[in-house]
Image (cartoon, rainbow, N blue to C red):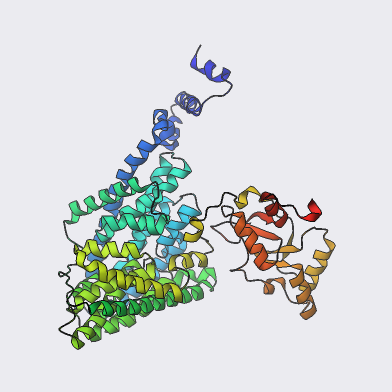
């Protein structure tokens, strides 16, 4: 029997049969349309024999992603460093240090607003959002915009880092290739940490720390099944870096030595200083960014120039503020910077970096975190060595540990910090002081700033990423199983009196209503609250009764135990189910009777 007849008479054709039939149909099309169709068809559909070998394709793709990401990061390094040296060379005219940050931030601000809106900021929150809220989708346009806009921003002297943007670019390369090859969405999402690890391996020249960062920060699971591919991509990217730029560490670090056990106490004090500096940095950045986000969206194109002006004016007087400043970090590690300059740089970086980031420039916070930590540690080490010269090491040792302490406090990736510094020094003796300072810094920063900076930045953008606690929650019953369409809502422009009349006229078994406006759902209100507000101010608008940023809700992949807890806390019997990518996008609602029924419990009136 001919193959076509087999397919038509088969009651249940397999996926492979369907792919083969699709291939035959494409081949028989006209010559004019065949090339376009062939180009747009994913690789695994063009060559159906590779479909059962998707795992092998995945591993091969990890090698390709590692190599491409390594090349891109090398280009990042060359562009940002060499172009910056030409635009504002050391000892050059002061007007250069004022002009280029202003012009650069203004021009790039327009490009980000007009053409590349998803290329702003660090890149790490956007990468996590792609993994958890956007099915692993990062567009090629965003990858290109992130690379060129970040390169120009950093080359113009804006003091942000290239490592965070490299993470988004690496993850974007992985996403684009995975989707072009026709991998399943689950596999495309699994490629995101692969690209992120490759980027960090090349950016910091630390392949082991890159693997740990991808699992600790991006995935949030140290036992993730993508470990093998992450290691493969990290090693490949690192080899590309070594082949093109040679075997040169990011920093030249003198050999570390512990002079006296008394130093452990000083390292604990350094952890306190690093934690406080981390909190100051994080709170200032988040507060300033929240203020910029309140301005009308049409003004966003010239927000970055605020950071450019501040950096330019500051750089006129203190040139060391411009750029990432890894050269000055190297000087601090080798004890070649004075105490006064280190203290000045800590203060100025704590002002210029949050302002540059909050105003919308493209760049990350990895590099600034290391810079601030090195200066805090170097300053404390200089004081300690002056007071106790026989019992303490030189200031460079404290600058080294300070880098790790600030990174742990700001990024909240303590194990990555320890392994990163170890790979930079190749010296095991630094591990114990580094762990002490990191632990103290992490404890202080987590107590004074409860939500990590990347999660807080995502929340400001209306994206709710799963926390570590939620990722480890074992919840067999998910909200999506009992979610139903929403049919009871109150417009935000209604007055309290109008809303009460509307609610009273609606026959419903529930005593809770959603408050909605043009954005979507912005809050939840129960009958008791409505009656209370009716007695106090009947003409008040409904929008004034709810907090559009923080209101009770759940996501479809969360457990029903969490939904039940939030219903009880807020005394409501309807809870909105919203998108992780947009907190105002209503997917449905979950009701108290449905949640109870899922546990086998029926209310007396429903029995």
**Residue 90 in view here:** no
Q: Is residue 310 left or right of residue 261?
A: right
Q: Position of residue 249 (x, y in %)?
A: 19, 62
List x then y, in percent, for residue 148.
34, 59
Tell me: 466 left or right of 149: right
Rendering coords of residue 364 (x, y %): 36, 66
Quadrant of the image occupied by residue 327: bottom left
**599 is higher (above) or lower (below) than 47:** below
Q: Is residue 17 above or below residue 572?
A: above
Q: How many marks?
A: 0
**x and y percent of residue 581 in the render?**
53, 57
Q: Residue at x 80, y 58 (%)?
A: 508
| Residue 509 visible in this rendered orientation of the protein | yes
Find residue 515 and report its image quarter: bottom right
Toward the top, the furthest residue is: 1
Residue at 47% across, 67% down: 457
Residue, x 44% and y 37% (percent of image)?
A: 40
- Compared to residue 337, the image places residue 117 above or below, namely above
- As drawn, is 467 to the left or to the right of 181? right
Which residue is situated farthest in the bottom direction here? Answer: 387
Foreground residue among 315 and 443:
443
Which residue is more in the foreground, 578 or 216? 216
């Amino acid at each position: 029997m001919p193959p076509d007849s087999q397919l038509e008479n088969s009651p249940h054709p397999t996926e492979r049969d369907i792919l083969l039939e699709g291939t035959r149909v494409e081949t028989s099309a006209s010559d004019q349309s065949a090339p376009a169709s062939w180009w747009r068809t994913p690789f695994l559909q063009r060559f159906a024999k590779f479909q059962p070998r998707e795992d092998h394709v995945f591993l091969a793709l990890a090698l390709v992603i590692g190599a491409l990401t390594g090349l891109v990061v090398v280009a990042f390094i060359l562009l940002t460093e060499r172009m910056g040296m030409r635009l504002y060379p050391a000892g050059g005219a002061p007007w250069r240090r004022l002009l280029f940050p202003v012009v650069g931030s203004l021009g790039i601000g327009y490009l980000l607003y007009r053409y590349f809106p998803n290329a702003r900021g660090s890149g790490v929150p956007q990468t996590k959002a792609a993994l958890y809220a956007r099915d692993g989708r990062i567009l090629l346009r965003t990858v290109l915009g992130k690379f060129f806009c970040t390169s120009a921003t950093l080359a113009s002297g804006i003091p942000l880092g290239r490592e965070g943007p490299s993470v988004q670019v690496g993850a974007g390369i992985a996403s684009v290739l995975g989707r072009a090859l026709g991998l399943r969405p689950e596999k495309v999402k699994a490629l995101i940490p692969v690209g992120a690890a490759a980027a960090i391996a090349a950016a910091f020249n630390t392949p082991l720390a890159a693997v740990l960062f991808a699992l600790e920060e991006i995935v949030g699971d140290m036992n993730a099944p993508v470990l093998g591919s992450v290691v493969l991509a990290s090693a490949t990217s690192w080899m590309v870096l070594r082949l093109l730029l040679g075997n040169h560490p990011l920093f030249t670090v003198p050999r570390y030595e512990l002079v006296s056990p008394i130093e452990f106490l000083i390292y604990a004090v350094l952890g306190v200083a690093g934690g406080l500096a981390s909190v100051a940095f994080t709170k200032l950045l988040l507060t300033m960014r929240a203020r910029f986000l309140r301005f009308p969206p049409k003004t966003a194109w010239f927000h970055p120039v605020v950071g450019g002006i501040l950096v330019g004016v500051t750089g006129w007087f203190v040139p060391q503020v411009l750029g990432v400043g890894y050269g000055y970090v190297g000087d601090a590690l080798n004890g070649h910077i004075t105490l006064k300059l280190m203290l000045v740089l800590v203060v100025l970086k704590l002002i210029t970096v949050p302002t540059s980031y909050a105003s919308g420039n493209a760049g990350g916070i990895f590099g600034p975190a290391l810079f601030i930590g090195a200066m805090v540690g170097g300053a404390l080490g200089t004081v300690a060595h002056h007071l106790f010269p026989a019992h303490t090491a030189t200031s460079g040792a404290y600058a080294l540990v300070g880098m790790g302490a600030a990174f742990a406090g700001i990024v909240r990736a303590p194990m990555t910090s320890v392994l990163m510094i170890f790979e930079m020094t190749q010296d095991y003796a630094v591990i114990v002081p580094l762990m002490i300072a990191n632990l103290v810094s992490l404890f202080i920063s987590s107590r004074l700033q409860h939500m990590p900076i990347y999660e807080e930045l995502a929340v400001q953008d209306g994206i709710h990423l799963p926390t570590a606690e939620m990722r480890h929650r074992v919840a067999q019953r998910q909200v999506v199983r009992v979610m139903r369409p929403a049919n009871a809502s109150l417009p935000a422009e209604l007055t309290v009196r109008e809303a009460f009349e509307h609610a009273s006229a609606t026959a419903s078994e529930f005593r809770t209503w959603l408050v909605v406006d043009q954005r979507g759902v912005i809050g939840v209100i129960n009958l008791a609250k409505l009656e209370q507000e009716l007695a106090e101010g009947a003409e008040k608008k409904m929008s004034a009764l709810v907090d559009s940023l923080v209101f009770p809700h759940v996501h479809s992949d969360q457990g029903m135990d969490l939904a039940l807890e939030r219903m009880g806390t807020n005394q409501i019997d309807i809870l909105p189910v919203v998108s992780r990518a947009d907190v105002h996008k209503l997917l449905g609602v979950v009701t108290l009777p449905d949640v109870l029924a899922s546990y086998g419990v029926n209310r007396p009136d429903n029995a």
